[in-house]
Amino acid sequence: MKKSRFTEEQIVRILNEVSAGKSVREVCAAHGVSDATFYTWKRKYAGMETQDVGRLRELEKENDDLKRLLAERDLEVSAVRKLFRKNGWSLPSELRERSF
């Protein structure tokens, strides 16, 4: 994904300029962004303060890390199941697939 030339903190400040009373066109022209970009930012960062954006960034990073850990765990479990099936062993009770 293309990196924005604005930081999240700058984006929040730009959005706050419109909240302060300036028109969307004025703010967009002053900062060199399109109306569509402004409304995309507004959808993502509406109502946030600068410190909220930092917290959002931390949560997104943590979520990515947790997804990666879960994917690695699923691969390990799958590999163990294949190995047990290949060798004709029965799976330990915690690895057996449950059919409901």
Image: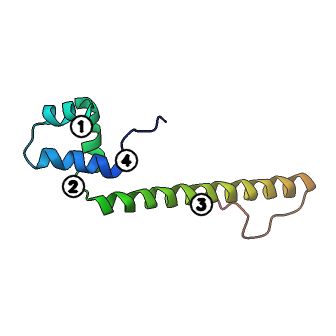
Q: Which of disc 3 and disc 2 is earlier in sequence?
A: 2
Tag 4: amino acid: Thr
Classify 41 as above or below 77. above
Quarter of the image holding residue 14? top left
Alpha-carbon span between mark 4 and mark 2: 17 Å
Q: Which residue is mark 1?
A: 39
Question: Where residue 59 sits in the image (x, y, percent)?
Answer: 44, 61
Q: Residue at x 39, y 38 (%)?
A: 5
Q: Circle 4: is it few (<14), some (14-19), or many (20+) Cα within 10 Å?
A: few
Question: Where residue 75 sits in the image (x, y, percent)?
Answer: 72, 53
Quarter of the image holding residue 87? bottom right
Residue 100's disc is 3
Alpha-carbon span between mark 2 and mark 3: 45 Å
Q: Residue at x 34, y 57 (%)?
A: 53
Q: Circle 2: is it few (<14), some (14-19), or many (20+) Cα within 10 Å?
A: few
Seen from the viewer's position, the closer of residues 30 and 33 is 30
Judged left or right of residue 56, residue 84 is right
Q: Which of disc 2 and disc 4 is earlier in sequence?
A: 4
